[in-house]
Each structure stands twice: as C-alpha cells, then as structure tokens.
Amino acid sequence: PEHIRNIAIAAHVDHGKTTLSDNLLAGAGMISQDTAGEQLAMDTKEDEQERGITIDAANVSMTHEYEDTNHLINLIDTPGHVDFGGDVTRAMRAVDGALVVVDAVEGAMPQTETVLRQALREGVKPTLFINKVDRLISELQEGPQEMQERLMSVIADVNELIRGMAENMDDIPEDWTVSVEDGTVGFGSALYKWGVSMPSMQRTGMDFGDIMELEQNDKRDELHERTPLSDVVLDMVCEHFPNPVDAQPRRVPRIWRGDPDSELAEGMQLVDEDGDVVFMVTDISMDPHAGEIATGRVFSGTLEKGQELYVSGTAGKNRIQSVGLFMGSEREEVEHVPAGNIASVTGLRDAIAGSTVSSVEMTPFESIEHISEPVITKSVEAQNMDDLPKLIETLQQVAKEDPTIQIEINEDTGEHLISGQGELHLEVITQRIRDNQGIPVITGEPIVVYREQPQEASREVEGQSPNRHNKFYITVEPMAQDIVDAIQLGEVSMDMPELERREALQEAGMDKDTSQNVEDIHRTNILIDDTKGIQHLNETMELVLEGLQEALDDGPLAAEPVQGS
C-alpha cells in the first residue's frame, strides 16, 4: 500500500481535466501518444464525446516508475460542469489526493472553489496544475515578466481558497497550500503534451525561457519530448500525495463515527489487507452484460469473488460475483483487490452510492454530503403505456446511480417528476433513458423548484384529539441561518449521538435548553418538544411527526417544501 496513490483530477468546466488524463494514460502506455489530448479516453459514453464534456466520473488504474519503484496510481477523472458536482463529491470519498487543474488564462473560477471545498471537506490533499500556459505565449503574447505575474496570482488565489477552508481542520498535520518551490504546482499544456514543475526543471535543465522559445517557434513536439507532461504530473502525484498508509489514519476518523479503539478501526488505519473487509461504495454504474457495477474504496481486508458481505441499511448478505479494476471504459477482472485500492465489483444488488459494505456488521461510514440540492424539475411520461413498468424501473435505477437526482411519482396526476442540479443534468438523464433503454419519453418544460420559509414567529395554534380529551399547541418560527447551514453541511443530524448533536447545535447558536428537546430534524426544519411532564406522549409522537412532515413537504403558500423553521 505504500506504493499506491488514489487521486482525482478536478477543475472548473473546460479547464482541461480529461485532456490531461489522456496524457497520463499515454505516458503509462495505455493509449497512443499521437491521439492523446484528442481521444478523450476517459469520456467513455457517446453523449460525453458528442457534447465535449465529462458527465460521469471515470476510473482508471496505471503504473508509473518513480525513484526506481513502480507505483500504482488509481485515478478518477471527474466532471467540471456544476450540474454534475455530485460525481465530484462521491469521487473525493474514494481518493486521498486531488489534482486541481486551473486554466492559466481564466484563472480560479467558481467551480474551482467548489471542487477544492469538496476535496478539503473529505480530508483530501490538493496539488495544482496550471493548464493552457501555451495560450499565454501564443494568444496573449505575454512576456516572461507578465506571464510570471499571472501564474503567481493564480497560485495565490488557489492558496487563499485552501487557507480559508483548512482553517477549521484540526486533523491536517502540515500546511496544505501549494507552492512552486515545494513542487506541488505544475505548469503546462495538456493539448500539446508538455509540462514543467520546479523538480522537473532541475532535472531537465529547462526553464521558462526555453519553453517560450520552443513554443513561439512552433517546436511543440520537441517541447513534448524534452519535458513530457505525464512524467511531470505523475512524479508530482507519487511524491506529494499521501499513500493509503499515511492517509487512512487521518481520513477514517473524519468519515467514520464508529468505536476508534475497535479492531475494525485499527484494521482500517493500518490498511490491513488481512483484516475484516470494509468497502465504501462511491459509484454505481450499469454494464449491459455484467449488470450493476459498484465502484469504491477498499479501506481494509481484501475483496475476492464469492465473498458474502453485509450492505449497510439492508438485511441479509450480498455475494460478490466478480472483482475488477476500471481501465476507462473497460473493466479488467482480477482475482482479488487488497486494502488501499479503488475496486469495482458486481453482485452487490442492494448497494447504492454511499453504502458501506463489510464482512462483519459495523457502524456505516458517514453519508456522503452533497453540497447542492436539486433546483430544477421536469415531468417525464412514457409515450406508450406499455413502456410504463420499464420506465419506472429505469427511473429507480437512475436514482440509485445518482443520489443528486430526486424521483417523485405524483399520484394525483400520474406524472413522474425528476429533479436535478440543472437543465443539462436533466437533459442528459432523459436522453440516456431514450437512447440506452430505448424508451420513447415525453418531457415537460423544466420548472424551478422553490422553497418556503416562515418570516416571523407564529401565534400558538391549538389542535384537539378526536375524543376532545387532549390538546396540542404548536408554534412555528424561522430558524437562525447558522443552524440551517450546520444541518445542510451534515454537522447536525438525527443519526448522531445525542450529546454530539446538542453540542453541535449549541455551537451553531441554539440555546442549551432548546437543544436538549430536539425531537426530530426533517430536511432543514427542527421540531422542539417543549412539553413538561406529560405521560404517554411517545405513543402519539410518531403521528405528530408524520403530520408535520406532510405539512413541511407541501408548504402552505405554494405547496413547495418548507425550510429553516
């Protein structure tokens, strides 16, 4: 495990992640050097190639020799478009390092900030690659001084983001900001396949002057031969990203709330391949031949064909039918995959993205918190009534593969409502239902999803039980934004031990007495039980919660969900 690196490439849309991945694949001898940069091998689906953007995170495993030792690099190429941010969040759970790519001309963009936040929230270490440096030379005709200033300002922007986010993280041993001197920043052009970093310049003797000269004289092939991008980036990955043995002792307490002194915890922290199997599913995909494939990180133990494993939240066991590694679109079956790797297995029919799969019953990992919520809704209907059962099955499969999609069947109108992160997100899903499943569907116009919220404290409302012997009194008031944020970021939930939850709520600004009486949290709404010494309340509490949840899902103003009350 000391020679394994699990990394994700993340960036704003169109900053060159997939083109960079092509270079790394070519450097590892997996695709031809000539087509690298244009082949976009990690965009494995037809619609990705057509649209020229990455839609699904794709995995590949490659080897790279660094300091005379072969390293195994498990890489995930993630989408940059904001609509597919859920894929990035899930990928970060499986990796220990994030290579953040920034376009030299555009600089750090909004999605750069989002992917950095997603990485740091999962305890994933960032390094920086500044891409498209050739544009500064050929398009903007910048001199060495201007170019240096521009590159330094990009690095400063990224570091400012990292500093702001890492402030509250006590478990990071060292400073995670990136710097040219340390070798945690690379520069180059993924399209023309050259790259440099401080260590590579020292090794090859090339400096920016040579690069500008070769670039201006159109000697890009010579530039690629003298300082190939794949070597620079893969060396940086091997040197600066933590291996599982370094990363897991820090990451496990961050994402798992189980007993830290148990054997299981020790097995995960030591990356023990002989320990109990612990596998976290971060992605579910469909293969027309093999069925559902669950991809994720093996934290301890060794995955083998035929094992019977528990899936968190479901009864019984699932039997693994095959174990493999992804090579872009191809899946290579192997005998076994030991701890510290990213594996893909078939046979886990009960698993969803976010499931914990293990050989012993255990506390599951923290659920993967997606920062964004669905904001756009479309209705989907089958053209032919005969396709209806197949459409319902497909929609359930879509929800299983992508937890950021919400599917709702409106019983009043018989419509299927599908909500996602944006119009492109929904367009891609509906196009795939048409093309891959062969179901002709009619879709409605996309509508924006709204939220309702009380603006001030209400009067006291009285409700009576049917026998008129009992009376309930309920009031509603808006909740402080800090508490709403804490719930959305997953810092407060009903799954936490009560004491932890109380402390988290008090930190967010709730007073002590109120935090002790939290009965339920529904979305971003909290029910406080302020009754004193009443008997038999527990027997009816379930019904009270049911009524309340119904009212909060269908708000009084416009039947939109209520938040922050």
Image (spheres, rainbow, N blue to C red):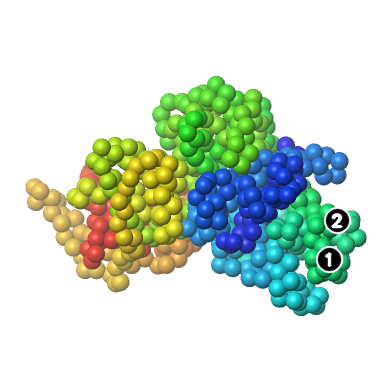
Label 2, label 1: how far apart the Cα atoms are: 11 Å
Q: Residue at x 74, y 67 (%)?
A: 134
Mark 2 or mark 1: name the one nearer the start of the chain: 1
Residue 235: where, in percent of width, then height? 79, 50
Residue 51: where, in percent of width, then height? 52, 56
Given residues 476 and 235, the one toward you in this image is 235
Residue projecting furthest to the top: 306
The quarter of the picture where the N terminus appears is: top right
Q: In this view, does 179 lie to the left or right of 551?
A: right
Residue projecting furthest to the right: 205
Given residues 404 and 324, the one toward you in this image is 324
Task: Categorize mark 1 by other alpha carbons within 10 Å: few (<14), some (14-19), many (20+).
Answer: some
Amino acid on which the number 2 mark rests in the picture: Arg
Residue to which mark 1 is pinned: 214
Q: Which residue is drawn at 41% across and 60% down?
A: 423
Q: Is residue 507 left or right of residue 550?
A: right
Task: Categorize mark 2 by other alpha carbons within 10 Å: few (<14), some (14-19), many (20+).
Answer: some
Given residues 96 and 131, the one toward you in this image is 131
The kind of secondary structure element at disc 2 is helix
Does residue 511 appear in this view? yes
Numbered label attached to residue 226: 2
Relative to 36, say whether 3 is above or below.
Answer: above
Instruction: For the residues labelled 2 and 1, say whether their Cβ atoms are less than 8 Å apart.
Output: yes
Quadrant assignment, res 115: bottom right
Q: In this view, does 176 lie to the left or right of 470?
A: right
Does residue 227 appear in this view? no
Given residues 427 and 495, the one toward you in this image is 427
